[in-house]
Amino acid sequence: MSASWTTPVHRPIRIARPIGLATGLTVLTVAVLFLVSSKVLQALGIPYASTGGSPLTKFHPATFLSLAALGTWAIVIGPGRLLAALAAQRPGILVFAMAIALLTFQAAVVQQLPISAVVDTFVLPLALFISILALRASVMERLVIALHLFFLVNSTLGYAEYFTGWRLTPYYEGGVLITYDWRSTALLGHPLINALATGLYLLILSGPGGRRFDLPVRTFLLIYSLGAMVAFGGRAATVMALVLLAARGLFSLAKVLSGRPFGRRDAFAVIVVLTLIATIGSLLVQGGVLDTFLSRFEDDSGSAATRVAMFHVFDGMALRDLFFAPDLGHVASNQRRLDLTIGIESFVVAFFAYYGIVTTLVFFAGLAFFAAEIIRTVGTPGLVPLAYFFLVSSTSTGIANKTTDMALIMAMILIGLDRRFIPPISDGRS
């Protein structure tokens, strides 16, 4: 009789091991996502973004890790139980998964494009989203601390590179090392990705995600991170972040004046930061420190002209092709004719050009369901960061190309904001 009760005694030990492995793989995925950029892979000689090499080298290491983490969580929770929980609690995830399947079919079978772009850009954030939801609160708290430390270090590196010309991450473009670009690469590898992520970090700090800090610390982090955006040189990201910060400050001020309840610390922090930005910014402009950054607004190297000309990539295309399967050779020919050397600088236009109207509209609907699931997880504070991401991404090819940006931004929102509205996926630990 006593021997028959030994199994329940040892069961927690057997379950704890896969839980620890799943947690470790999820945390490792986040770490690799933030620390191993495509530029790092190129510097290591891995042909991630260039021709040649094994097909496996075309997928980001974080993608492999995210799938391993998701598979381990499925074992811990149970595949059937996980699917049932997703169907009941997170139906938008399954809709997004079906939209990805459609896009993969369109890319691989119809358009004969590499599937690595779809996998890294969309499968990675989908898998990582589910894995992050399964993490314990104590692990999430450590990730929050790591997130703030990461951006403190990243901004510091941005300043150091900007003023010294030294680069931590070599900047490659088309397999060629770029030495003339003054913009900092820091830990995220590309100036514009650094600007995008830092801008979103500012929105997290100025909202509920910054409430853990006292006002002086929070104000310092906001000013310090905003100054680093100058080093990264992202015009759209900087302007959009300033607009949203100003809108948040004006909204807080309006709440104060109307006598409605408001978060005094949030309102005061935003108002103080905006005042300091105006004061310090004026001093830096007068001192000539921002001349290099401001010159990007005067000479955009043809970027604005590209955004006007890109709508002509559809010229001469048959209506049937435009709806179902654009001729990529025709699109490329129009790009050459229009001298669009920079590319199609809008992921929305690029999607229609690469995948056609029908597939694009269906996929965007699935993407909207995924965004809704993120909002359901973190609440309305996630609306502004998500809007920021899509607005800034709309000024470049962004998620229409192979990129880990969406996974990076999604992880930042889930980690940086309070996850308090929807309970995490259960594995029976309660």
Image (tube, rainbow, N blue to C red):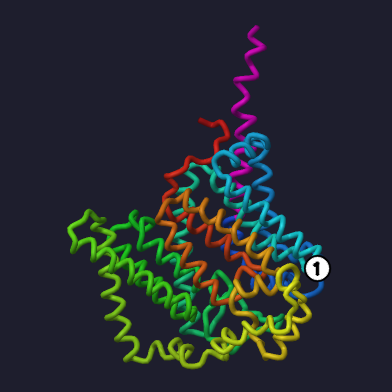
Q: Residue at x 74, y 66 (%)?
A: 58
Q: Residue at x 61, y 59 (%)?
A: 32
The answer to whether 395 is drawn above or below residue 218 in the figure is below
- Magenta residues? 1-29
Horizontal relation, residue 18 to residue 394: left or right: right
Nearest the camera: 94 or 47? 94
Within the magenta stretch, is there residue 419? Answer: no
The location of residue 159, given as percent across then percent down, is 45, 78
Q: Residues within 10 Å of mark 1 (few under 14, many from 20)?
A: few
Nearest the camera: 328 or 39? 328
Question: Which quadrant would residue 340 be assigned to in this image?
Answer: bottom right
The location of residue 409, given as percent across then percent down, is 53, 62
Q: Residue at x 45, y 86 (%)?
A: 293
Nearest the camera: 303 or 361? 361
How would you classify the magenta stretch by its main secondary structure? helix
Q: Residue at x 29, y 60 (%)?
A: 266
Q: Which quadrant: the N terminus?
A: top right
Name the residue furthest top.
1
Q: Which residue is mark 1?
A: 112
The answer to whether 395 is drawn above or below residue 211 in the figure is below
The location of residue 247, given as percent across then percent down, is 33, 69
